[in-house]
Amino acid sequence: MIEQVAAQLMEAHVGQVTLNEPMKNHTTWKIGGPADLFVVPDSLENLKKTMEIIRKAQLTWKVIGRGSNMLVLDHGIRGAVIKLGEAFEELRVEDERIRVGAGYSFIKLAVQVGRMGLTGMEFAGGIPGSVGGAIYMNAGALGSDVSKILEEAVILWENGEIERITGSEMEFSYRTSILQKRQGIVLEGVFSLRKGDRKEIAKLMAEHKERRMLTQPLQEPSAGSVFRNPPGDHAGRLIEACGLKGYRIGNAKVSERHANFIVNLGNATAKDVLQLIQFIQKEVYQRFQVELKTEVLVVGEA
Ligand SMILES: Cc1cc2nc3c(=O)[nH]c(=O)nc-3n(C[C@H](O)[C@H](O)[C@H](O)COP(=O)(O)OP(=O)(O)OC[C@H]3O[C@@H](n4cnc5c(N)ncnc54)[C@H](O)[C@@H]3O)c2cc1C
């Protein structure tokens, strides 16, 4: 079945098509078993074709960006994984509006618009991942997030329909959006920024970067904050107060630099990380009666 779908996609020349692609090559944690079928369509037309073939075959599917917020389990992902590659990295500047493809790097975008003297995206200077992933997650930092700047998103829904929807229709709230309820693929985002002072923007971004370098384990593979902050508190504070910095299961370890980060010491399995997540949840609950919920998305089969 999967082989047949792969053959159809190859015959249709949709782009890169791979069977049993190790997902650890596509996640920042460098963890994850194989995806049955991995497709990188090389144009919008070919993405549409890909989705049509997948729909007809009734195959389950998942889109990924740069895998910076995902724990892919050790037995990998059944069905198809679609990655938006270079074909979805177009950037157009229309005065204070930025129209950008979903595959574009969110950090690179923040740096580039800052250099153009546009303000509003300084918060994004340290958020790895793609524009599509940032919209899906309503990614944010430093009191701002995607919801504050997104004017509109272009989405390819599961039924094949392409729709432009406004920022207010995205149902954004803390690290969530409508896309977490209704499956679709972000093709493009339109961000509304303001003219600012180039030097001020650069200074602010340099300060944020320095702070991240001091407080986050950026040299080790991770997926950023593992847990959502509970209302009025910080997951990292609670974990640290339980004395868990440095706690290790297998090759997964609570970072000594930032207690809400779990780092891969080398060849950690998703099982190591999941066990560590569950251990942290249990300890924090016992001590503070707070149920920590994961911000990272756990996908695939254990
Ligand atoms: C060192 C580090 C620091 C981080 N700091 C922050 C931070 O300060 N703030 C913050 O919010 N996050 C942070 N993160 C987490 C992560 O970078 C963000 O959540 C990011 O927005 C995820 O983007 P991605 O492209 O990697 O998404 P992925 O991890 O690939 O996917 C995440 C979800 O988005 C969906 N998705 C991806 N692309 C699309 C698309 N085109 N259309 C529809 N759905 C899509 C996927 O299906 C998946 O469900 C950090 C991560 C790391 C490693």
Image (cartoon, grey):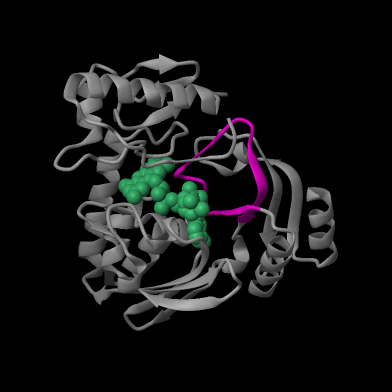
Q: Is residue 230 above or below residue 289?
A: below
Q: Is residue 37 left or right of residue 66?
A: right
Q: Is residue 270 above or below residue 34?
A: above
Residue at 34% over, 57% down: 138
Q: Position of residue 260 (x, y in %)?
A: 31, 32
Residue extending furthest bottom?
Answer: 95
Residue extending furthest left?
Answer: 232
For the residue pair 183 and 258, the one nearer the viewer reads as: 183
Q: Is residue 72 magenta?
A: yes
Q: Is residue 62 left or right of residue 29?
A: right
Location of residue 86 by image quarter: bottom right
Q: Position of residue 119 (x, y in %)?
A: 25, 69
The range drawn in magenta is 60-82
Location of residue 26 by image quarter: top right
Q: Position of residue 87 (x, y in %)?
A: 62, 67
Q: Position of residue 141 (x, y in %)?
A: 27, 51
Residue at 23% over, 49% down: 207
Q: Is residue 13 magenta?
A: no
Residue at 41% over, 16% down: 248
- The answer to whether residue 253 shows anywhere in this view is yes
**Count of numbered circles in the view:** 0
